[in-house]
Image (tube, grey):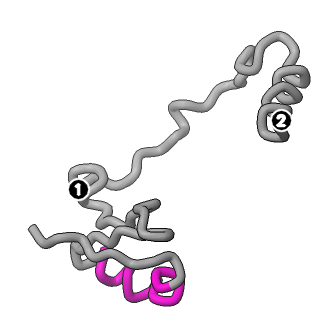
Amino acid sequence: MTRPQRKGVEDARNQLPALLAEAQKGRTTIITRHGRSIAAIVPIEGMSGGQTQKTLMGLAGTGKGMWGRDSAKTLRRLRDEWSR
């Protein structure tokens, strides 16, 4: 197994078509920002054992009750956390 190549965000943005071609050939690329790993471009076979992505339709539902009894209040509280 070859070691993943590392690319900074700007290089990855400029070289995306080539990086996708490399992924198609089985090569993984780690994307870094300021020297820290933040994302990866990986061959799809490496993600799911050779299977393609599964549908999300089985997870579909109403979402009723997901945010509590007062969804507006819950969302305001969550937004307040970000504005502090």
Left or right: where 67 falls relative to 37 = right
Local packing at callout 2 (Cα closer than 10 Å; few below 14, some 14-19, many 20+) is few
Task: Estimate the x, y position of residue 62 in percent, counting from the top left.
Answer: 71, 24
User: Relative to 78, is 71 above or below?
Assistant: above
Residue appearing at x 35%, y 68% in the figure: 30
Report the residue that reaches farthest toward the top.
69
Please name the residue that numbered disc 1 is placed on: 50
Q: Would you say 38 lies left or right of 27 here?
A: right
Residue 48: x and y, percent?
28, 50
Start and end of the magenta stretch? 11-23
Q: Secondary structure at mark 2?
A: helix
Give the quadrant of the N terminus.
bottom left
Neighbours of disc 1 within 10 Å: few (<14), some (14-19), many (20+)? few
Amino acid type indicated by mark 2: Arg
Q: Residue at x 83, y 35 (%)?
A: 79
Residue 71, position in %: x, y?
Answer: 85, 21
- The label on residue 81 is none
- Measured in 3D between alpha carbons, the distance from the residue under mark 1 to the one under mark 2, in whole angstroms, is 40 Å
Q: Nearer the viewer, mark 1 or mark 2?
A: 2
Q: Is residue 76 left or right of 49 when viewed as pictured?
A: right
Up-down: is 32 above or below 15? above
With 72 as the anchor, is 57 left or right in this view? left
Looking at the rendering, which quadrant does residue 76 occupy?
top right
- Expressed as whole percent of the image width and height from the top left, the position of residue 35 reads 42, 69
Q: Which residue is mark 2?
A: 79
Q: Please, what is the three-letter code of the amino acid marked with disc 1?
A: Gly
Asked which quadrant contains residue 69, the reply is top right
